[in-house]
Amino acid sequence: MIQNFDYAEGPGSAPGSGPRPARPGLSGLSPDELETLVAAWGEPAYRARQLFSWVHGGRARSFAEMSNLPLGLRETLAVRAVLDTLTILERRKARDGTTKYLFRLSDGETVEAVWIPAPGRRTVCLSSQVGCAIGCRFCATGWGGLVRNLTAAEIVDQVRLIARDTGQRPTNLVFMGMGEPLANYGNVRRAMELLHAPAGFGIGWRHHTLSTSGIVPGIRRLAGERLPITLAVSLHAADDETRSMLVPVNRRWPISELLKACREYVACTGRRISFEYVLIRGVNDTRRDARRLAGLLAGILSHVNLIPLNRVPEVGWEAPPPARQREFARLLEEAGLSVTLRQERGGEIEAACGQLRRRYAPAPSGVGV
Ligand code: SF4
C-alpha cells in the first residue's frame, strides 16, 4: 500500500521533516546562511568562509580543533550549533572494500550509507529518508514505511563522516540508499548544492546520480533545473501489472506517464537516463520481458543497468542464473540499447538497501512474498 507522501517536500515541511533542533546543524547551511549566523554573534563575514571550509573540507571532529577561529567563537559554536548531526553506530567492510555504515540520528533513528571504492572513483551511496513510503516489494527499507525525511545536514553528514572515517574524499555521489529522494526534494537539492560547492567537497554535477522510483512531478521539477546530473529511474518491469506489484507507485504514475516525463527530462537536460532493472527469477526475467523493455526504451537516450537481485533472506525471490542474466542483457544489446549487467558488490555485508538497519528495526510480520 502506498502511504501518503509529498513529492515536492521542501525544507521544514511535513510530514516528518526531521527534528528541528534549537541548534542548527552547520553542514546544512549555505555560506550566506553561515554569514548571517556568525554576524548575529558579531563576527565578520570571513569567519563564515573559514567555518564553511572547516565543516565541509576539514577533518575537525570538534569546534575546539578549528584552530584559526577565535576561542570565543569556538565556545559560542559549541553551545549554539551542531557540527555532526550523525554518529557512526556500525560499519561493515566487505572484501572488495565496499563499506556499509549505519548512522544514528539525534532522535535515535538510524540510516545507512555505503562507501564504494573502485579504480579511479570513490562513491558514496546516500540515504534521503528514514524508511520509505514507496514500498517496493523487494526492498527492506520500504517494509516499515516512511518515518521522516532527512534534513540537508543529515544528508551532507553521511558524506562528511565517511570521508573522515576513510581519510579519503569521495568523487561520486549516488542517491540510491534509503528513501525516495524526490519525495524529499528540498533537502536533497540543498544537500547536493552544498556537496557541489567548490569550497567544500566540490563534487561536480556530472558525478551526482539521483535515483527515483518514478515520481513524475519530481522528475519534471528536476528537469526544469537543468542540472547536468544523472537521473536513474527504477523501472524494474516492462508492463504495468508487474511494475505495480514491484514498485507500487506505478499505480499513480504508470509506465507510459513515467516514460513521457523521462523523454521531457532528456529534452530539457540533454542527459541520458539510467534505467535500473532488478532481475528477479521468474518475475521479470523472460525473453518477452527483455523484448518489451527494448520496445519501451526505443528512442530514449538511455542506459540500462541490469541488477541481479541482492537476495534478502526474508523474501523468497532471488536473481536468475547467470546464463539467463547474460541472455537478458544480450537481447537488449541486440535491440540497440546500451546495457550494463552489474556485478554484485558487498553482498556479505548486507549491502542491499535497508538490510543492515533492519537488524535494529525488524520488519513487521507478514512481510515477504
Ligand atoms: S527501493 Fe528505494 S524507493 Fe523502493 S522502497 Fe526501497 S528505498 Fe523506497
Image (cartoon, grey):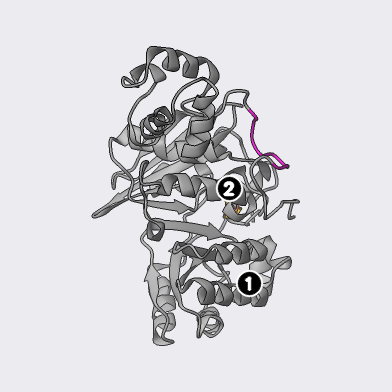
Q: Residue at x 60, y 64 (%)?
A: 219
Label 2 CB, ligand 1: below 8 Å?
A: yes
Residue occupied by mark 1:
258
Mark earlier in primary sequence (2, 1) = 2
Q: Is residue 349 magenta?
A: no
Q: Residues within 10 Å of mark 2 (few under 14, many from 20)?
A: many
Q: Nearer the viewer, residue 356 or 231?
A: 231
| Element under disc 2 | helix
Q: Which residues are magenta?
A: 13-20
Q: Amino acid at mark 2?
A: Ala
x and y percent of residue 280 in the render?
52, 65
Q: Amino acid at mark 1?
A: Leu
Left/right of residue 158 with respect to residue 37 in the rendered view: left
Q: Residue at x 44, y 77 (%)?
A: 328
Q: Is residue 72 above or below residue 241?
A: above
Left/right of residue 358 with respect to residue 343 in the rendered view: right
Q: Nearer the viewer, residue 286 or 187?
A: 187
